[in-house]
Amino acid sequence: MMCSHQGACDRRSSCSARSSRFRRTSTGVGSILLLVTPMLFAACAKDDITNPGTYTLTGRVRLVGALRNGAGDSTDVQRVENADSVRVYLYQGSTRKDSTGTTSGEYRFGGLSSGAYSVVTVLWGEIGDTVSIASVTADMAADTLVLQSSPTLIGYPNPFQDATAVRFPMPSSSAVEMIARKPSGLTVRSLVQSNLPAGYHQVTWDARDDSGNLVSAGPYWILYRAASDYRCRLMVKM
């Protein structure tokens, strides 16, 4: 009996020696055959278990906004590193291979063969981020995916408790959609669904969902769309 790992199993000579001993003892004792055969296959297949030739790719997603006081002044950069259920997609070339959601900001893809991959997260329209990995040849961590707030959509105060205001300019009149959404993709409130003229506008969110209930504490995205103009703003409810 030959070891199945010819040319690749470092224990080839060991497997061959085990086979030779097996042939010698099996001639006279049938019961030993039943005992030794499983041990032989387990020894020769051990490398398949410990080194299956597949890898794990891990990474993180960061949400970025701005801390602002009640007057709308920016006081610091806001980073959320532990958001749950942010959807992340795995691509090999142009083929989508898998998708998963984050747990405390981290995602994980397992069972990958060697090769080039990309990880992608999409927030709203063309707002998203992509990280490409030229060659996966071992378990590895990808660079952090970053979802960055738009500079022309301002929310204050942030963080907020009872209410927050969202301010934005419009270069021309347009139909506008504005919603409040969790990082998981769940829409909790429709804020604007109407035609607005050109100019500066301000919308107040009273921290309630479409059913009138106060939303739970945590991060939210304010998402704006006017024709092909997509914007986003990270807000945190205290």
Image: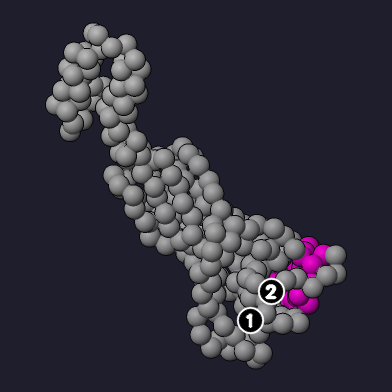
- Position of the C terminus by quadrant: bottom right
Residue carrying label 1: 159
As shown in the figure, which amino acid type bears the numbered disc 1? Answer: Pro
Q: Residue at x 51, y 63 (%)?
A: 105
Q: Is any atom of residue 43 visible in this view?
A: yes
Q: Residue at x 76, y 82 (%)?
A: 162
Front position in the image: 157 or 173: 157
Q: In the picture, residue 16 is in which quadrant?
A: top left
Secondary structure of the residue carrying tag 2 is loop
Residue 141 lies, in percent from the top left, at: 37, 56
Count of numbered circles in the view? 2
Q: In the picture, residue 154 is in which quadrant?
A: bottom right
Secondary structure of the residue carrying tag 1 is loop
Main secondary-structure element of the magenta-colored stretch: strand
Up-down: is 15 above or below 170? above
Q: Would you call the spot at circle 1 few (<14 residues within 10 Å), some (14-19), or many (20 or more)? A: many
Drawn side of residue 159 relative to residue 196, left or right: left
Q: Is residue 190 magenta?
A: yes
Up-down: is 44 above or below 124? above
Residue extending furthest right? 212
Q: Residue at x 64, y 67 (%)?
A: 221
Q: Residue 217 got which mark? A: 2
Q: Residue at x 32, y 39 (%)?
A: 50
